[in-house]
Structures are given as C-alpha cells and as structure tokens.
Image (cartoon, grey):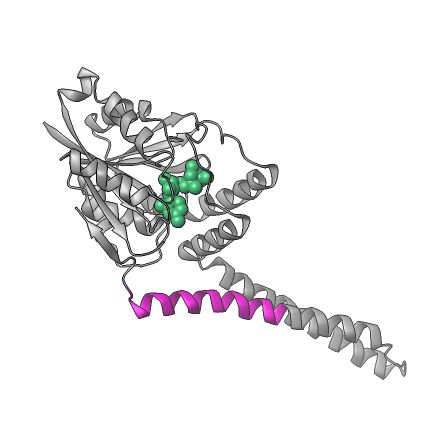
C-alpha cells in the first residue's frame, strides 16, 4: 500500500470542509483506489476566523488518516501549501483547494500518470470557470508574462497538482520565503504530465481574492522569477540619454544659426516625463530591495498554533 497525501489549504472554509472530506471518502470507496493507496489528509488552516479549525479538529479526532496544522493567523495560501508539503509523508502528494473547485474525480487519472513514471502531474484548467471579464484579461496577461519568463506555457495552470516524493523533497529544500508554488513546480524540473479538468463552482462560501490582492500576487511572482523590469529600466535610461543628446545637439545648432530656442512647453514635458520615469524606476527597484529585505529577515513563513 502506498500513501497518498492530500494537502488542503483552508481559509474560512467552514461551509465546505465537511463536504470536501465526504467527497474524498466517497472517492476512496472505489476499489481501484482503496486497494492500492492509503489516503493521508493534511489540512492546513490558514488562520481562519470562522469554525474551520474546529471542524478540522473534529474530523481529525475521528479519523487517524487526517492530520492538520492551524496557523496563528492568516499567512496566505502559499505558506499553507508549503507547510502541507513539509507535513505530508506520502509517496505521492496532491495539493487541492478545499472548495471542491478542483474535482476529486481527477485524482485517479493523476495517480495513473504518476504510476507511469511522471514525477509531477499538473492539473490544467480546460476552462477558467466563472470569472469577471477584467479578471480574465488580467490573468491572461499575467500568465503570458510569467510563461515567457519560465519558458513553460502556464496558461490554465493552477495549484491543483500531484507531486512525487522527489519533487516534494526538492520543493522542501528551497530556502526562499517568497514562493510561487505554481511556477516553482515547473522550475524544479522532473518529468511532468498534465491532466485537464473543468473548474467546478465553489461548493459554498466565496473566493478570498480581491483585485488588490491579485495585483500584489502578480507583482510578487513576476519579480520572483525575472529581473526583466530592472533591465527595462536600464534600457529606458539609455533611450532617454539618446533623446537628451539629440535635443542638446539640436539646441547647439539652433544657437549657432542665431535662432532662439523655443522652450517652455518642451521643458515642462521633459521634466514631468523624466521625473515620472525616475520615480517609476525607483519603485521597481524598491520592490526588489523589499524582497531582499524579506529574505534577509529570515522570519518563519508561518507560525503554528496547533498541530496533529
Ligand atoms: N486559501 C488559503 N489562504 C488564503 C486564501 C485562500 O489557504 O489566504 C485557500 C482557500 O481556503 C482555498 C484555496 O486557497 O482552499 C483557494 O482559494 P479561493 O477559492 O478563495 O481562490 P480561487 O479558487 O477563487 O482562486
Ligand atoms: Mg476556489
């Protein structure tokens, strides 16, 4: 019997925890799973303010295959996933959302691919489910950028994945505090396959993402994987220098020809443009400095309140 760990990050999911647990139990009724694999449920309560932690504790007390960690406050889904990766003991580890948007029905297929020798099995969204137009556009742009940087097509990518022990150990060995699970699983390499799935409706409750948190997520992840923004600053700097040089030469020529240099509006435009450019560049550099500072402080990624 092999152990298959299922990591479930949960933040204010009181409405769906029980449904999720029942769905996994139901899935394991299937002889093809039951006779081959022992499930290990690893719930990570990400500092929920509702009954989530209590519900998880209750489930865990009645089922020895269920383990959990409760954080002292909300540390974010990434921290919850990486905590789960540390806790999981299985030969294969599956990461999935608590809200049943990642269909448990895809698990047998993932396990089959894993048995075929794929170390990583990506769950790929065949559609993006219900989301607003602006969200879709924004996500599309973000994934195009990040795919380019990483060199893998990440559109349709999600946190729904199966990882073999080697991949889990590789992720656990990473020292960085600011992680991007979805892309790091590509970065570590290994043979990978994918399984496509339909994004289901949330089984209850509501999504925790706001436009603001999504924007921060995008900036954090892009700067985690590329220094391109810094290089763009350099390129723009050179461009500005050339423009300045051209204008300077133009001014000298005009002077030699005895023409007055007409100038107030062009001056105002140049000053505002360059000040804007400089401040934007400083802002971009600041993002990287802040990142270094975060890593340097070396604070723990999460603080555990309770664990089984
Ligand atoms: N989640 C978490 N910590 C957070 C936010 C979300 O652990 O700070 C969990 C949440 O409980 C769920 C999963 O991450 O299991 C996906 O969250 P959500 O459904 O809100 O995101 P969406 O499906 O809309 O991308
Ligand atoms: Mg969801």
Q: Is residue 207 left or right of residue 93?
A: right
Judged from the image, the quadrant occupied by ligand 1 is: top left
Is any atom of residue 213 visible in this view?
yes
Q: Position of residue 147 (x, y in %)?
A: 45, 43
Residue 180's place in the image compared with 268, above or below, is: above
Residue placed most toward the observer, 220 or 271: 220
Residue 1 highlighted magenta (yes or no): no
Q: Position of residue 305 (x, y in %)?
A: 24, 55
| Residue that extends furthest to the left in the rendered view of this protein | 1
Is any atom of residue 153 visible in this view?
no
Region in magenta: 277-299
Q: Position of residue 15 (x, y in %)?
A: 38, 35
Q: Is residue 98 left or right of residue 4?
A: right
Residue placed most toward the observer, 196 or 229: 196
Task: Identify the residue at horizontal 36%, vertical 31% (top origin).
Answer: 123
Q: Position of residue 292 (x, y in %)?
A: 37, 67
Task: Identify the residue at horizontal 56%, vertical 38% (top origin).
Answer: 136
Task: Identify the residue at horizontal 37%, vertical 45% (top origin).
Answer: 50
Residue 291 highlighted magenta (yes or no): yes
Residue 147's place in the image compared with 304, above or below, is: above
Q: Main secondary structure of the magenta part?
A: helix
Residue placed most toward the observer, 270 or 303: 303
Residue 304's place in the image compared with 17, above or below, is: below
| Residue that extends furthest to the top in the rendered view of this protein | 31
Q: Is residue 127 left or right of residue 169?
A: right
**Figure quadrant of residue 97:** top left
């Amino acid at each position: 019997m092999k152990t298959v760990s299922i990591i479930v990050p949960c933040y204010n999911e009181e409405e769906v925890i029980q449904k999720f647990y029942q769905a996994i139990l139901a899935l394991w009724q299937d002889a093809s799973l039951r006779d081959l694999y022992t499930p290990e449920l690893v719930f990570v309560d990400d500092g929920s303010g509702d009954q989530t932690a209590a519900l998880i504790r209750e489930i865990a007390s009645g089922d020895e295959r269920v383990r959990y960690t409760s954080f002292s406050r909300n540390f974010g889904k990434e921290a919850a996933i990486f905590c789960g990766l540390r806790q999981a003991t299985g030969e294969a580890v599956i990461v999935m959302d608590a809200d049943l948007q990642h269909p448990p029905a895809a698990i047998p297929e993932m396990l089959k691919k894993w048995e075929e020798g794929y170390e990583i099995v990506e769950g790929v969204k065949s559609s993006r489910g219900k989301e607003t137009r602006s969200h879709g556009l924004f996500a599309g742009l973000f994934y195009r950028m990040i795919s380019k940087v990483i060199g893998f097509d990440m559109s349709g990518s999600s946190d729904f994945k199966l990882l073999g022990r080697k991949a889990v150990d590789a992720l656990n060995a990473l020292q960085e505090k600011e992680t991007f699970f979805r892309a790091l699983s590509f970065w570590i390499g290994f043979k990978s396959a994918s399984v496509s799935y339909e994004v289901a409706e949330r089984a209850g409750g509501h999504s925790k993402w706001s436009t603001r948190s999504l924007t921060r997520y995008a900036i954090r992840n892009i700067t985690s994987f590329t220094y391109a923004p810094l290089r763009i600053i350099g390129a723009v700097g050179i461009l500005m220098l050339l423009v300045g040089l051209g204008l300077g030469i133009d001014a000298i020529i005009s002077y030699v020809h005895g023409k007055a240099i007409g100038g107030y509006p062009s001056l105002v435009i140049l000053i505002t443009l360059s000040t804007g450019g400089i401040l934007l560049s400083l802002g971009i550099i600041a993002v990287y400095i802040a990142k270094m500072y975060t890593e340097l402080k070396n604070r723990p990624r999460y603080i555990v309140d309770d664990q089984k």
